[in-house]
Image (tube, rainbow, N blue to C red):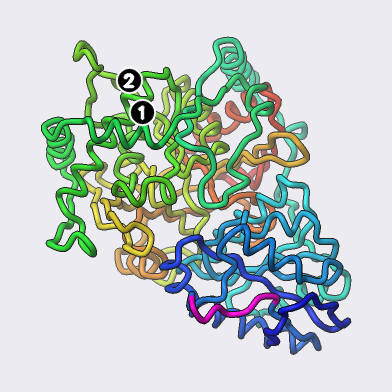
Amino acid sequence: MKNDMKAKVNLKSKQVQLIASGDLRLSANQVCWPAQKEMEATLTAALAAEGYELVRAHAYDDAAKHGFIDSQRKGMEVFKRIDPTAPLIIAEAVWQYSHHVLAGLTTHRGPILTLANWSGTWPGLVGMLNLNGSLTKQGVKYSTLWSEDFTDDYFKSKLRQWLTTGKCSHKTDHVKPLAKVKIPADARKLGESLATTLRRDKAIMGVFDEGCMGMFNAIIPDDLLHATGVFKERLSQSALYHEATQTSDAKARAVFDWFKQRGMKFHTGPSDATDLTEEQILWQCKTYIAAVRIADDFGCDCIGIQYQQGLKDLLPASDLVEGALNNTDRPPVKSRDGQHVLYDGKAITHFNEVDESAGLDGLMTQRVHEALKQPPENTLHDLRWGDWDKSGTTSEYVWVFEISGSAPPAHFIGGWAGAEGFRQPPMYFPKGGSTLRGISKPGEIVWSRIYVAGGALHMDIGRAKVITLPREETERRWKSTTWQWPIMHAVTYGVSRDQMMAKHKANHIQCVYANNAKSADQCALTKAAMANALGIKVNFCGTKADGKAW
């Protein structure tokens, strides 16, 4: 692969440009660079087999010790040198910040291909899906492609299609617009009633500093959000930090004791730099109290904490905070005057990484499930990775849904007693903090995603089941991803791996349990009716649990 583009270059007909967007954090870029380098070498060989030369549009940085675009400014500088009419591949083996390259992609006139390796390690799949959602929101045309090793027939045929025509497409015949779905009268009536209530009474989405990790797709424009009856309260993480510092050690200790009494296991050690420590956990307990109180101060119906790039230099990570907030059974927090418990008996819907699309979805989901007397606890997950089961338990394709924060223990086998706390990886979180790890229990779920396309809100919704795999297989999957984080083994109904990748417009996917398959279908139909009544364009994806069409 050529790597010498220091001045603006007009590429030849059999040359293709490559860029790689990375993290903002130097530590993450350095650790992840070998995986990116290996993937690019494999991709170079794949293009060479088709008679094309891959030309890297920005060089390896000897001082930084990586070859990623690591800031928005650097991305703009790189695009000054790129041939604006030539084919361009954005290749990702790692999590990446979409805004590093979004500015340049908005004015690129040549064919664009987003591409990722099929790996859960860092992972490029999640980064690519975020970029796809961001490009979709921005209205930038692109093609997308993925592969385990770039040698399979499906990948080669689609790559060849893109190289020769500037486009490649995938089958999405699993998608059915709501207009073609028969919504039962009871589901339609309840969904429309919930929508009417939301628009009439309105709701507040508390946003602790908008925008996180370059996720342009995670910001809903105010006018689109207001049309649903939801309005943002723009809060400051500095206020959250201050409130945490004003919370007493005794109150933090009471929350910590509550976790342990419920059976949660914390894996602590002596080194603050590499281990989880009790002090880190106590700071998380203070942040939990602070978040509940600020939510009450502003009358918030849901809240989102920016998370990774927000308070990482001041406080431990907010995972434990977020998952506890999303759980109905959680440590009680009293009002400032001590007279009553805040949000007593209710989960406080929290959307990880201030993903406002997940926040709106979570708020709607909670109301639908409460109205139908179904479990209201819901969370976003990364659509992290997937693989065939190696244990012989099932012949079905099993996704790994995994998220660092916001997964509620109500989703875990054993609940709080099945939850474990490990230190967050130091390369992401210098101040540490406990994760909220568990294995999701078997059961029926509804999955969904709200996203922006064509200046409007859309929702894709479908059904899946969570299955139990042997511990050895679970450990294999954890070791292939981030083992400190909670995991969900999900099998989607009527949606294949490639169909999901072709249609999904985000790195995140919203998940909620129902008591059985029939109830889950009813919840999905009711939420679709509610979304439609709010002006959201709805698609059903896949089938019901019995394989029948919607």
- 210 vs 42: above or below: above
Q: Which residue is drawn at 73% across and 34% down?
A: 456
Q: Which of 521 and 299 is in front in this view?
A: 299
Residue 124 percent location from the top left of the image? 55, 66
Asked if marks 1 and 2 touch (Cβ < 8 Å), the reply is yes
Label 1 vs label 2: CA separation? 7 Å
Residue 275 percent location from the top left of the image? 20, 61
> Type of residue at label 2?
Tyr
Residue numbers of the magenta segment:
57-63
**Lateral position of residue 532 relative to residue 179, left or right:** left
- 365 vs 424: above or below: above
**Mark seen at residue 96:** none
- Label 1 sits on residue: 347
**From this viewpoint, is residue 513 visible?**
no
> Type of residue at label 1?
Ala
Q: Nearer the viewer, residue 182 or 157?
A: 157
**Lateral position of residue 204 relative to residue 237, left or right:** right
Name the quadrant of the N terminus: bottom right
Helix, strand or loop at disc 1?
loop
| Disc 1 crowd, CA 10 A, few/some/many (<14, 14-19, 20+) | many
Name the quadrant of the C terminus: top right
- Label 2 sits on residue: 343
- 123 vs 405: above or below: below
